[in-house]
Amino acid sequence: MVSHFNQEERQREIAAFERDLERIKDGRGMLMHALHLAQNRFGYVPSDVQQIIADTLKVPLSTVYGVITFYSRFTLVPKGRCDLSICMGTACYIQGSEELLKETEETLGIKSGETSPDGNFSLSTTRCVGACSLAPVVTVNGEVHGRMTVQEMKKLLADLQQQYGSQSESDEE
């Protein structure tokens, strides 16, 4: 998954995506498949890619946009290198996920649905990850962290900031 490109890389990725679309365009019901291809390749579904999908599959752009915004798997915003999600399902909410969300938002300086300006962190909420016995649950790049407390969340965030902060500094060297 590549979400930050220089212009030349972006053109190569768009061309590769268009080739992928050409292979599937004649199948029935390929919109979901095309959106998965885009999400996996770009890390989100940018507006120019939505137009390419609409044109190639011969569906209205409004339909493409509607499917993207209906399913939480797809996003219109680039994800950070570290993707955090806090479960707000009933079991997690009762066990304190709202406090975990507040701590995370304050620590990272972003709200749910946003990505940090440096591209290191994205934050979202979800309704259920199917791990209710571990409530409250936080996922980090898909890895489940259960029975989280605010103190454990502070430690996890500090560790992640150190890990992703040092990666971005070493990337710039």
Image (cartoon, helix red, strand yellow):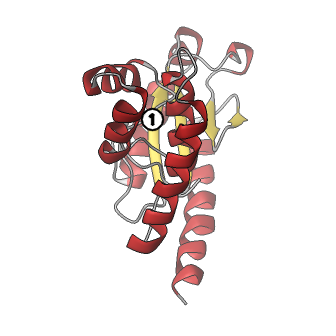
The image position of residue 142, as x and y in percent, is 67, 38
Quarter of the image holding residue 40?
top right
Query: Relative to 53, is 96 above or below?
Result: above
x 54%, y 22%: residue:
30
Quarter of the image holding residue 105?
top left
Name the residue furthest front. 26
Query: Relative to 62, is 114 above or below?
Result: below
x 54%, y 39%: residue:
22
Which residue is label 1 attached to?
Answer: 124
Quarter of the image holding residue 145?
top right
x 48%, y 23%: residue:
31
The one of 161 and 39 positioned closer to us in this rendering: 39
In the picture, measured across the screen, residue 97 lies left or right of residue 67, that is right
Amino acid of disc 1 = Ser
Q: From the image, which quarter does the C terminus lie in? A: bottom right
Count of numbered circles in the view: 1
The image position of residue 61, as x and y in percent, is 28, 27
Q: Residues within 10 Å of mark 1 (few under 14, many from 20)?
A: some
Query: Relative to 152, is 161 above or below?
Result: below
The image position of residue 55, as x and y in percent, is 34, 34
The image position of residue 38, as x and y in percent, is 50, 41
In the picture, measured across the screen, residue 82 lies left or right of residue 48, that is right
